[in-house]
Amino acid sequence: MLTVGEAVRQRRSIRKFLDKPVPREMINEILEAARLAPSGGNRQPWRFLVVTDPEERAKLRKICWDQAFIEQAPVVFVCGADLTAYSQASRQKRSQELIDYGVTRTLSGRFADPEFRASLLNLPASDLKLFVAPAVAGTYIAIEHMVLTATALGLGCCWVGALGGEGEIHALFNLPKTLVVAAVLPVGYTDNVPPPRPRIPLSEILLRPLQAAIKEEEE
């Protein structure tokens, strides 16, 4: 199995899969990697549907702009963000976990103030649609855990965001309206690994030179 660094460097977007099943143990390992992902407030909004049935994969292909590799992959994960993870009841449960697991001892700033945290819990229940952004952001982190784990296991995958018309995947799998479909992730073996595509240099993604930050710390 690859190291994290090796998986990061070897990961590619794979759009051609072999007709070879993925062992259940590997599917479980990929899901376990997602389960252990971090999320703001430990909300853990991610939810997954494992699709292996050929007929369902064919229907998913049509929904996802008729991309053939979605049907071709032996396993497709439908990755969703559950907005009920941000309900008032959920907020209260996760807040108690901060206390039970000693996290409050590491908090600082306003979050170290018990009264401030209590005021957040006493906020009235709001429209869950307001939490789409953090819910999807947390789910994206879990999906990337899945991508790197699949790569480390010798599998290929492709992060798919072309999800067809609104509600089509919900209708296909009878998903609740409180679930936001964030991505579809086809996974499988491949003998077609493309070369790495260009990445912009480090100097273009830093908002200030790294040398300046290191110099400030040394001074």
Image (cartoon, rainbow, N blue to C red):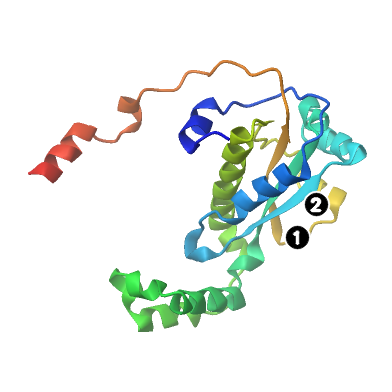
Q: Residues within 10 Å of mark 1 (few under 14, many from 20)?
A: few
> Residue 197: where, in percent of width, then height?
52, 18
Q: Amino acid at mark 2?
A: His
Q: Amino acid at mark 1?
A: Lys
- Which mark identifies residue 13? none
Quarter of the picture containing the C terminus is top left
Q: In the figure, 53 relative to 209: above or below? A: below
Q: Closer to the N terminus: mark 1 or mark 2?
A: 2
> Residue 65: where, in percent of width, then height?
77, 31
Pointer 2: what residue? Answer: 170
Measure the C-alpha gap from mark 1 to mark 2. 8 Å
> Residue 206: where, in percent of width, then height?
31, 33
> In the image, what residue occupies the spot 29% across and 36% down?
207
Pointer 1: what residue? Answer: 177
Q: In the figure, 149 relative to 190: above or below? A: below
> Residue 97: where, in percent of width, then height?
50, 75
> In the image, what residue occupies the spot 53% across and 19% down?
196
Q: Residue furthest front?
A: 1
The answer to whether residue 178 is visible is: yes
Q: Are marks 1 and 2 in contact (CB under 8 Å)?
A: yes
> In the image, what residue occupies the spot 57% across and 38% down?
148
Instruction: Judge by depth and name the residue closer to the eye, 44 or 31.
Output: 31
> In the image, what residue occupies the spot 73% across and 35% down?
186
Quarter of the picture containing the N terminus is top right
